[in-house]
Image (spheres, rainbow, N blue to C red):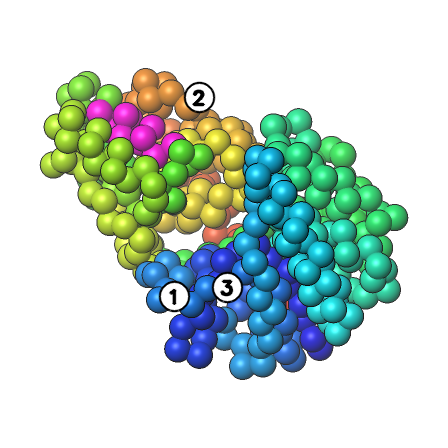
């Protein structure tokens, strides 16, 4: 089977291998186990991969490079229109030779792929919509257009669309789905540091405005001001780092904060095992993997009710849903620390739920999508 991926992810060519963003590549490597050869249509650059990157495992891979583009602003839109005909042709040609078409949405390449797949109604197709499927949320117009195409069963014949969460407006081609990070062998006991001695906070993700990493620092500051012994670890890199370091220095938080940068999955795992609370105030998400990852290791998520996160937290049976406000988060964390039985029950519920979503179960579901 020739399996085609249409993706906006920027790939890196290094030492005769194709690399990309680790969580995405890790997932695609599970899909690869059930195919014969792989075709990827996506942007690419020659660059040394970072600690967070992984390589495709497939030995039979054909990479079709396309230029990067975005649709933000008149100037970028004009440039995109000039590039689009060539990209559309490459997508169309790749789809002609594929046995299974797989779209990664939402994204600019996903949008073009969603348009072109209309002409291949007899081919087997899947689309992974990794963003917020909630129609009532604020979305860029290009995301809305992708949703409209994907939910239209006339335009998306022979396609299963994988979305995060259960939504009332589901058409027959929409399939609620999930993402897994850990396997059965990771179901081990977790021994946490004594929370009465120090409350360990963690932030995992890119240090960008969308993820609100400053909110995590504000929570730490608020806890220290209340006389609570607390610490915070950041796992991730991004344009906000300089701002975060400056804030930390300004409010004398340096001794309580660690910036680890981009670290591999094993280091993140160890940090989750030590942490008591994940502070995650993201503005926009699909299925934020860090939330179930935190629960897997007995770390209580303190997060905003974005996308399907409320469903993931069992409407506060497995974590805390807060406004993106540091004071609110500090008060909720302090309440939970002062209620050990409630905290223990929440941790137990979270671990049991998160440990249902293993990579083995994920691979079984994928296999059924490719070879039912």
Tag 3 secondary structure: strand
In the picture, which quadrant includes the N terminus? bottom right
What is the x, y in percent for residue 228? 18, 25
Camera-side mark, 2 or 3: 3
Tag 2 secondary structure: loop
In this rendering, the count of numbered labels is 3
| Residue designated by label 3 | 44
Mark 2 touching mark 3, by CB under 8 A?
no
Q: Is residue 114 magenta?
A: no
CA gap, disc 3 and disc 1: 9 Å
In the picture, which quadrant includes the C terminus? bottom right
Identify the mark at residue 104; answer none if there is no mark.
none
Question: Which residue is located at x 62 percent, y 41 percent?
Answer: 77
Q: Taking 144 as reference, is 239 left or right?
A: left
**Label 1 Cα neighbours within 10 Å, binned few <14 / some 14-19 / many ≥20:** few
CA gap, disc 1 and disc 2: 39 Å
Question: Which residue is located at x 33 percent, y 22 percent?
Answer: 326
Q: Is residue 215 magenta?
A: yes
| Residue designated by label 1 | 47
Task: Compare marks 1 and 2 and give the one earlier in the sequence.
Answer: 1
Q: Quadrant of residue 19?
A: bottom left
Question: Which residue is located at x 84 percent, y 49 percent?
Answer: 155
What is the x, y in percent for residue 24? 51, 58
Judging depth in this view, the residue of 140 and 226 nearest the camera is: 140
| Residue designated by label 2 | 323
Camera-side mark, 1 or 2: 1
CA gap, disc 2 and disc 3: 38 Å
Report if residue 231 is visible in the image: no
Question: Which residue is located at x 73 percent, y 52 percent?
Answer: 114
Q: Which residues are magenta?
A: 212-221
Q: Is residue 349 above or below residue 251?
A: below
């Amino acid at each position: 089977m020739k399996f085609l991926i249409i993706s906006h992810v920027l790939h890196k060519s290094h030492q005769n291998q194709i690399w990309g963003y680790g969580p995405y590549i890790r997932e695609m490597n599970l899909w690869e186990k059930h195919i014969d050869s792989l075709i990827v249509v996506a942007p690419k650059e020659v660059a040394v991969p970072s600690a967070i990157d992984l390589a495709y495992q497939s030995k039979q891979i054909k990479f079709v490079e396309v230029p990067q583009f975005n649709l933000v602003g008149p100037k970028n839109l004009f440039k995109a229109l000039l590039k689009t005909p060539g990209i559309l042709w490459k997508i169309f040609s790749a789809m002609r030779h594929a046995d299974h078409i797989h779209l990664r949405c939402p994204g600019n390449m996903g949008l073009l792929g969603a348009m072109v797949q209309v002409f291949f109604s007899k081919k087997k197709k899947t689309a992974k919509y990794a963003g917020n499927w909630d129609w009532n949320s604020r979305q860029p117009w290009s995301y809305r257009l992708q949703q409209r195409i994907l939910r239209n069963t006339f335009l998306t014949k022979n396609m299963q669309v994988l979305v995060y969460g259960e939504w009332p407006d589901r058409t027959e081609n929409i399939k609620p789905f999930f993402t897994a990070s850990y396997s059965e062998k990771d179901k081990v006991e977790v021994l946490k540091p004594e929370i009465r001695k120090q409350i360990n906070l963690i932030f995992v993700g890119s240090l960008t405005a969308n993820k609100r990493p400053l909110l995590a620092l504000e929570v730490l500051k608020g806890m220290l001001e209340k006389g609570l012994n607390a610490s915070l670890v950041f796992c991730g890199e991004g344009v906000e780092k300089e701002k975060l370091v400056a804030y930390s220095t300004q409010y004398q938080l340096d001794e309580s904060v660690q910036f680890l940068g981009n670290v591999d999955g094993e280091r993140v795992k160890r940090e989750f095992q030590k942490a008591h609370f994940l502070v995650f105030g993201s503005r926009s998400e699909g299925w934020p993997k860090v939330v179930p990852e935190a629960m897997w290791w007995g770390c209580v998520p303190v997060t905003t009710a974005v996308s399907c996160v409320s469903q993931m937290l069992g409407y506060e049976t497995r974590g805390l849903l807060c406004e993106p406000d540091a004071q609110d988060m500090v008060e909720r964390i302090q309440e939970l620390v002062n209620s050990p039985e409630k905290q223990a029950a929440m941790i137990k519920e979270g671990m049991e739920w998160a440990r249902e979503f293993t990579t083995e179960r994920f691979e079984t579901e994928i296999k059924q999508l490719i070879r039912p």
